[in-house]
Image (cartoon, helix red, strand yellow):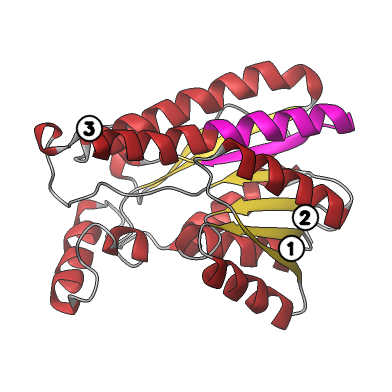
Amino acid sequence: MLLAEKTAIVTGAGSGVGAASALRFAEEGAHVLCADIRADTAEETARRIQKAGGSATPFVCDVSREEEVVAAVAAAVDIFGRLDIVFNNAGIPTPRLGARLEDHTAEDFRRLVGVNLAGVFHGCKHAVLQFKRQGHGGVVLNTGSVAGLVAWGGSVYGATKGAVHQLTRAVAIEGAPFGIRANAIGPAGMPLTNFMAAGGLDGDAEAMEKTVRQVASSHPLGRAITAEDCAEAAVFLVSDRAANLTGVVLPVDGGYVAR
């Protein structure tokens, strides 16, 4: 039980990496606040955890709104008594698959930055404030992307994720004297989650299957990255087994960036 009796907030917990990670955190003994912008999906993840014998509470949260992130932190502390882990996972994809820089509207830009970067900023800020109030350290984990490490399409999306990586490093350095660790995972294209489907493939089984094959073939290990792959990396990074790891961006990419 790597996370026994620890309290974790997972944003974007209603689906994809967030749901898989919330389930794994609970399996490892954590109390999980399942935060998501959609009440029904947050509740579904919490129900799955509870059905398996774990401890979870759903919470509706739009991470682009700072006051809602503050409320999520307060709720976790009120319900479970403390906060140990904040996984800032919530994010949105490029609005249209294949969109070039010049294809993005000003509203596309504002929305991507508002959720993918500001949402992580809010989560990091209020995690750090709570950890300092408690005085026993804590762990921040952020979801970045291989698109923030290399130019892999989705220019504005990639820029937000590159900023997340740098924010992670800053939190790691500033938090180190207080026993606060901060790391990030960098997935590489997950066509088997509804995150990528939201980019324009939803409901098109043939297009999805083609995309899965294309993405898998781009990875040296030859298979598509799954939400569960990311969840395993997340469990390790937030656990005490990674006690001397901070400021790390861990690609979960089948070797893509090692080429």
Q: Is residue 168 left or right of residue 113?
A: right
* Front disc: 2 or 3: 3
Instruction: Give the percent coordinates (x, y) of residue 54.
Output: 76, 72
Give the labeled residue for mark 1. 28
Q: Check if mark 1's residue and mark 3's residue have beta carbons within 8 Å.
A: no
Badge 2, how many Cα within 10 Å: few under 14, some, many 20+?
many
Give the labeled residue for mark 2. 3
Which residue range is magenta in the image?
A: 121-142
Q: Is residue 258 visible?
A: no
Badge 1, how many Cα within 10 Å: few under 14, some, many 20+?
some
Cα separation between marks 1 and 2: 5 Å
At label 2, which amino acid type do we have? Leu
* Front disc: 1 or 3: 3
At label 3, which amino acid type do we have? Ala
**Between 230 and 164, the one nearer to me in the picture:** 164
x 51%, y 38%: residue = 119
On whether residue 79 falls in the magenta region, the answer is: no
Give the labeled residue for mark 3. 106
Q: Check if mark 1's residue and mark 2's residue have beta carbons within 8 Å.
A: yes
On whether residue 122 falls in the magenta region, the answer is: yes
**In the rendered structure, which disc, 1 or 3, sits on the residue that comes first in sequence?**
1
